[in-house]
Image: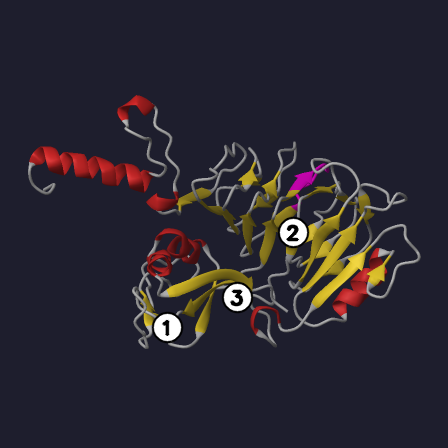
Amino acid sequence: MPNLLVVRLTHTGIFPGGRPNVNPIFIPDLDTGLENQDRKVPVYVPYGGFIDIPLSSRSLLSASSGAIAKFVAAGFLTATYTNNFPGGGGGGGGGTVVWRPGDPTVPDSHYDTFPEAYDAAIAMPGHVWIDWDTSLGNAEVPIKLGGGPWDFEGRIGFRTIRFLGVSDEIQMSIEDGAQILNLYGFDGMTRVAGLGTAVSPLIFDPSPFNVIAPPGLILTNGAKLRNSGTVPLVQLGAGEKLFVLATNLGGFLGSPTGFADITGGAVLQIAALTGSSFDSGFVTGDALSTLFFIHDATTNLPSIPGFAGTVVHLFGDLAQNIAYSPGTPGDWAGSPLTIAEALDRIASVVATLNGAPIP
């Protein structure tokens, strides 16, 4: 079952000012293929409904600074990032199981061993979180995930709800030799370390996916990966693709061995948004590989000295969302807070001095 990450566009049914709007909304800047900007296709959001657009660097660029962003800002649409599993919009059922290591007296839907929690999650439909709880006094930190391969089917992820210790220490270790297939993602203020020395611990099976919707991994709400092993956490080969959406302080912590190694024409797409971060050297790759890196004003593309492939660096943000701190505050009678405000105030002064609109 594919992990199809999407941006969901919902028609609000109103014009700015509150008048009813029964017209479909045309999105003019989307593509038919993964990155084929020269192959635009008509995309409409129907009145009274929504559409799900697979996440790629192109659709994220539209949602952050293109046509989608402008329609959202004007009130024609709402946009949310979600998943679209078969059997139901945004999840198709599903739920939560709790993995509480070291507690044999756990109640229903709580499990003290990972195989029990995994079996329970697999038996549930749709999107499922395995919440881990290491707040008990007898819990071992970091909790150790071994064995496998464990196939998460692109719909099951890990989320921390309570943990013992401090937020910047490793909370989970993926042990040497353990493998997780098609993981949906990590959610919550936590640190996860891979300890692989022979095989990469995270594997994304390309067979259920297509060129428009590659496999995806979410790192959100403070979830950060660290590689403490000697092989990359992810390895992509010829023809393989992976999309990583890092939001709300998620990302990859610096370590001697990186997050991903991509070779033979593989494609890695990273969306680093709302304070997420990828430290220097997070990706390596040969000359045939491609990295698409899109980010907003809260982060940036780090140095990647071990990457010899093509880098497509995309900045996606609106001027009204980019904070501005004047280098010389005395130049302003009250410093502007955003680039948009600064540009508007400068334009006003220039037009006044010119005695006419700016040509």
Q: Which mark is residue 13?
A: 1
Return the x and y of residue 97 as percentages of the image width and height.
Answer: 77, 62
Tell me where the magenta segment starts and ends, as one range: 225-233
Nearer to me, 334 or 127 = 334
> Callout 3 environment at 10 Å: few (<14), some (14 to 19), or many (20+)?
few
Quarter of the rendering occupied by the C terminus: top left
At x 64% / y 69%, what residue is drawn?
1
Any magenta on residue 229?
A: yes
Q: Residue furthest left?
A: 355
Q: Which residue is mark 3?
A: 210
Question: Tag 1 or tag 2, which sits nearer the N-term?
Answer: 1
Per the image, label 2 sits on a secondary structure element best described as: strand
The image quadrant of residue 127 is: bottom right
Q: Which residue is mark 2?
A: 187
> Callout 1 environment at 10 Å: few (<14), some (14 to 19), or many (20+)?
many
Nearer to me, 232 or 76 = 76
Nearer to me, 54 or 109 = 109
| Count of numbered marks | 3
Amino acid at the residue labelled 2: Asp
Amino acid at the residue labelled 1: Gly
Per the image, label 1 sits on a secondary structure element best described as: loop
Return the x and y of residue 306 as percentages of the image width and height.
Answer: 54, 34
On the picture, is 358 further left or further right than 154? left
Any magenta on residue 351?
A: no
Which of labels 3 and 1 is toward the front? 1
On the picture, is 143 further left or further right than 275? right
